[in-house]
Image: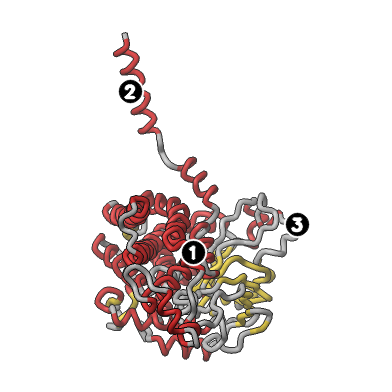
Amino acid sequence: MGARRGHEVLERFRAHPAQVWHRGVRVQDVTSEPGLANGVRSLAGLYDFQWQQANVTLETDPLTDQKVARSFSIPRTPTELERVGAAMLRSSEYSMGMMGREPSYLNRAMSAYAGAAEFFRDGDRAYGDNVTQYHRYLRANDLSLTHTLLNPRPNRLAGPARQADPLLAAHVHEERDDGLVIRGARMLATLPLSDELMVFPARLPDGPEESARYAFAFAIPTATPGLKFICRDSVDYGFNGFDHPLGSRFEEMDAVVIFDDVLVPWERVFCYRDVNICNAAAVRTGALAQMAYQVVCKNIAKTEFLLGLASMMVDGSGLESFQHIHEKIAEVWVNLTTLKAFKRASESDAQANEYGVFTPAWDPLDASRNLYPRLYPRMVEIIQQIGASGLVAMPTQADLDGALGDEIRYYYQSARLEASERIPLYRLAWDAAVSAFGSRQVLYERFFFGDPVQMASAVFKDKDRSGSIEKVRRLLQESHRFGH
């Protein structure tokens, strides 16, 4: 098939319905379900967008001569890696970075796994072959993935094996000739309205023997029998694009995944009962770096959107004379430029990993993923400060079309904008910074890669600071001699 069009995405969802639960009811058709359908339609639109930007986002598969998504590429040179980055940046611009888990994110993970298939062969040669074949299948059919990474942990100090109920987390309930039977739950599937579910190898802190039944990685269709997605309440409330310009389009949904005796065929298993492989997979294969590379592209698009939005609000209200406004706009610009520098540094210092896959340098990406959870909430605060009370007093499309429409158009003008221009601009700002959709985005960015405190602890423990310490020590020694 190769790269898909939007209508093919919708047709596949209708033909292969997953067991999606929303607001207490099993959804019969995600392409028409209130609260979900608009997000599905926007996902389909992203697939049409890749064809509109084909010179950047698509490439030719040399084996089939078909056009395929460049985000499935396994780069072997610096140029190939940079082309992947350009494709992901362009793709992120479709939603202004508001689709945090668009397909390219997990396309990069599976491409890294496939490029490092030898890593999985350490567990069993068949597992490495499974990874390679699955990547080819995804790429050839241009399928979308959701994923689960975390085990539920009521006791945050223990792994799944040492919980009060060790059967809570997804685990192998039974081994059969035709595959593994999985029972339990996994957290947290963003974009559950996808074609396939990738169950990542979760990090397992407990002992290898007690963790063995939780040690696996596999991928299965979201429509697999026994697989359930329990969604949170949608932040798309069914309003039009004028009133909710972001929430009505880019609700990607989040869900908890329940495995009710789900059969996973052996050919879809990538590792099993090997705790070391589970704990090392993200780093050794380069998957974490490749995913973080996509995220910095997404964050560039998102920050550029906020810079443009804030600038339009300033221009429209004639606020450019205030120095505190200069400071706020400068802050967002600095953030954008910093993210671009992180991306460029990760490309400039990229190297082939032990499997020959060109992988972006980790330190710039690690710095970016530690910084953005603080940058994004602050930039949203800037939108709130610029918009002030105007963000909570904007009328709707129905108001404009109603009996008071003429009065609204008269009283809601700003220094440089007619009401017909100001109202949609400020409703966009409200949706980015005040609405349920906007609040979910803030929470999402705070915890995108996990607990920021634990991430900072990893930086503290893992980064080599000896060179910096030695320079200070040398200065102290020289200063001591100078004083005598």
Task: Establish if 170 lies above or below 451.
Answer: below
Task: Establish if 156 lies above or below 302.
Answer: above
Dot 3 falls on a residue whose secondary structure is loop
Please name the amino acid that badge 3 sits on: Ala
Q: Position of residue 233 (x, y in %)?
A: 61, 74
Say which residue appears at 32% left-offset and 17% top-offset: 479
Q: Distance between the residues labelled 2 and 1?
A: 53 Å
Residue 475 has which mark? 2
Q: Which comes before the other along the chain, label 2 or label 1?
A: 1
Q: Which comes before the other along the chain, label 1 or label 3?
A: 3
Tell me if 167 is positioned left or right of 385 in this view: right
The 10 Å Cα crowd at callout 2, few under 14, some 14 to 19, many 20 or more, is few
Residue 164 has which mark? 3
Q: Mark 1 points at which residue?
A: 389
The reply to whether discs 1 and 3 touch (Cβ–Cβ < 8 Å) is no
Determine if residue 468 is in view. Answer: yes
Q: Which comes before the other along the chain, label 3 or label 2?
A: 3
Say which residue appears at 75% left-offset and 60% top-offset: 165
Q: Where is residue 260 in the image (x, y as percent from the top left)?
A: 68, 76
Determine if residue 356 is in view. Answer: no
Dot 2 falls on a residue whose secondary structure is helix
Q: Give the colouring mode of the picture.
A: secondary structure
Q: Nearer the viewer, residue 282 or 257?
A: 257
Mark 2 or 1, closer to the camera: 1
Mark 3 or 2, closer to the camera: 2
Residue 251 has which mark? none
Task: Establish if 95 lies above or below 281.
Answer: below
Tell me if 328 is positioned left or right of 402 in this view: left
Please name the amino acid that badge 2 sits on: Leu
Please name the amino acid that badge 1 sits on: Ser
